[in-house]
Image: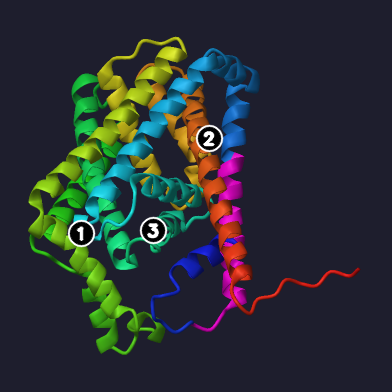
Amino acid sequence: MTNEELLASETEHIPFEEPDSKPAIKGKLILIQGMVFAAGLGLLVFVLYKIGFSVITETISQIGWGFLIIVGTNFSRHLIRALCIYLAIPKEHRNVRYHNVLAARLAGEAMNLMTFAGPVLGEATKAAMLKNRVSFARSAAAVIVDDIMYYVSVALMMLSGVLLMALTVGANGKVIRYTLIGVGIAATVMLVGMFLVVKFNARPLSFVLERLDKRGWLPGFVATRREYIHEIETNVYSVYNERPTLFYSLLGLGFLAHVTSVLEVFLGLNLLGYTPTFSHAYIIESLTKVINAAFSFIPGVVGVYEGGNGIILKALGYTTAIGVALALIRRGAILFWAGFGFAILLWRTVDRGAKSLAKPGTEPASEEA
């Protein structure tokens, strides 16, 4: 059973008609995904080649057992985000324990690294893995609320990071200047849009589905889910409308998650032999989030993440090698916990397979004497 099949089985209670399979389209998507990933991997190899493999290896070797500090800091972010999801589930429906939510988050984040649809598939995985204890509508709403709080804080961090860089470092050069202006505008639009959606209880997804339905463009398998989608949207907005204290608490936890990211950058540079200012660590993390958002269609943002960090640190007065080394160290911590996520997915797959075989009427294949 593949991870996609596991996700489908987890959401089997949602009524919908299966669309006709289109293996040709699926094959093309897999091909495109492979090409995009290969391009990113090629960029990473090129960056390492230009800097020098020996230089990168020597730089990273300085960190030693300090890598465990980065791994621990990275895990603290998972703990905080899992807490957000846990608290976003209404107490009267919270028939789940915190460690179950943490396991679902690790599994979902592992899925994020696998495909260019990772952000969608990964979030769906988190919600689906809780459906045995919480209704899918509730778990999906909790995951979406966590994402909203996180991205609101991301937009604020990006905007403040741009302002901080302009004030402390300057914006010398047209490329840097226009990049900072572009990031500032995008972050502002993102913030205003999210504020309006939440403040006025807008339902953009339902609005789009309604317009498509009126034009006769709404696929049948989506139409059968409309009530379910509306229920998820209602659950999402109930956090702001009915539990404002929780809303701002979750927003605060989102900022706390970013603090751990800034701390990770600060500690990483110290372990590499540099003593950065807190403002530099903040700028690096805020601009790294810009890279992650802009190139999220690349699985794992491979190549662009490392190259982008090299450019950011070069602009701040460090070397490109240090930027790439920092990115590789942080990626190592991400992959460390992704390994746990993949193990959880594998365990769930095997567990469901064993339960399926154990159902009445299911007989194991007979063995020859």
Circle 1 or circle 2, nearest the eye: 1
Question: In the rendered structure, does residue 228 fall within the stretch colored magenta?
Answer: no
Position of 187 compared to 70: left or right?
left
Give the labeled residue for mark 3: 130
Q: Residue at left 61%, top 69%? A: 358
Q: N-terminal of the two: label 2 or label 3?
A: 3
Q: Nearer the viewer, residue 157 or 102?
A: 102
Give the labeled residue for mark 2: 336
Circle 1 or circle 3, nearest the eye: 1
Q: Residue 272 shows which numbered tag?
A: none
Q: Does the residue at mark 1 contact the one at mark 3 (Cβ under 8 Å)?
A: no
Given the image, on which type of amino acid does mark 2 rest?
Phe
Given the image, on which type of amino acid does mark 3 rest?
Leu
Q: Residue 92 shows which numbered tag?
A: 1
C-alpha separation, residue under disc 1 versus residue under disc 2: 35 Å
Q: Residue at left 44%, top 84%? A: 17
C-alpha separation, residue under disc 1 versus residue under disc 3: 15 Å
Q: Is disc 1 surrounded by few (<14), some (14 to 19) or many (20+) residues within 10 Å? A: few
Question: In the rendered structure, does residue 24 fall within the stretch colored magenta?
Answer: yes
The quadrant of the image that shows the N terminus is bottom right
Task: Give residue 104's position: percent from left, percent from top.
Answer: 42, 51
Given the image, on which type of amino acid does mark 1 rest?
Glu
From what the image shows, is residue 42 above or below residue 23? above
Chain part drawn in magenta: 19-42
Q: Nearer the viewer, residue 306 or 273?
A: 273
Q: Residue at left 20%, top 59%? A: 92
